[in-house]
Amino acid sequence: MSDDRLESALRQELHKIAPDIEIADIDPDDDMREEFDIDSMDFLNLVAALSKSLDLPMQEEDYDQMGSYNAMLAYLRAHSG
């Protein structure tokens, strides 16, 4: 799957959860929960939405690898085949 497709999906799903945040203004290495002021349920919704839209299993034991925007992209790249 292309990097553009993965990043587009991440941006789209983040926008649904935190519509007031400008993706271009974030620090891509900061913790997303703090950066976007989202709670654990929002994070779970993000992971579920990405998993569904990308048809990509995302295991609970991997959640610690998805903390920042860049970490989430790296995870998606590594697991998208």
Image (spheres, helix red, strand yellow):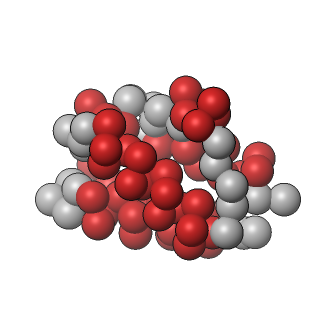
Q: Quadrant of residue 37?
A: top left
Can residue 74 be seen? no
Image location of residue 77, percent across then percent down: 72, 52
Q: Which residue sits at x=77%, y=47%?
A: 78
Q: Which residue sits at x=51%, y=69%?
A: 8
Q: Quadrant of residue 13?
A: bottom left
Image location of residue 24, percent across then percent down: 33, 55
Which quadrant is home to the N terminus?
bottom right
Q: Is residue 47 left or right of residue 58?
A: left
Q: Which residue sits at x=31%, y=44%?
A: 41
Q: Which residue sits at x=76%, y=58%?
A: 80
Q: Name the residue nearer the viewer: 40 or 4.
A: 40
Q: Quadrant of residue 65?
A: top right
Image location of residue 62, percent across then percent down: 63, 33
> Height in image: 27 above or below 52?
above
> Height in image: 53 above or below 47?
below
Can residue 44 be seen? yes
> Height in image: 28 above or below 48?
above
Image location of residue 27, percent across then percent down: 36, 37
Which quadrant is home to the C terminus?
bottom right
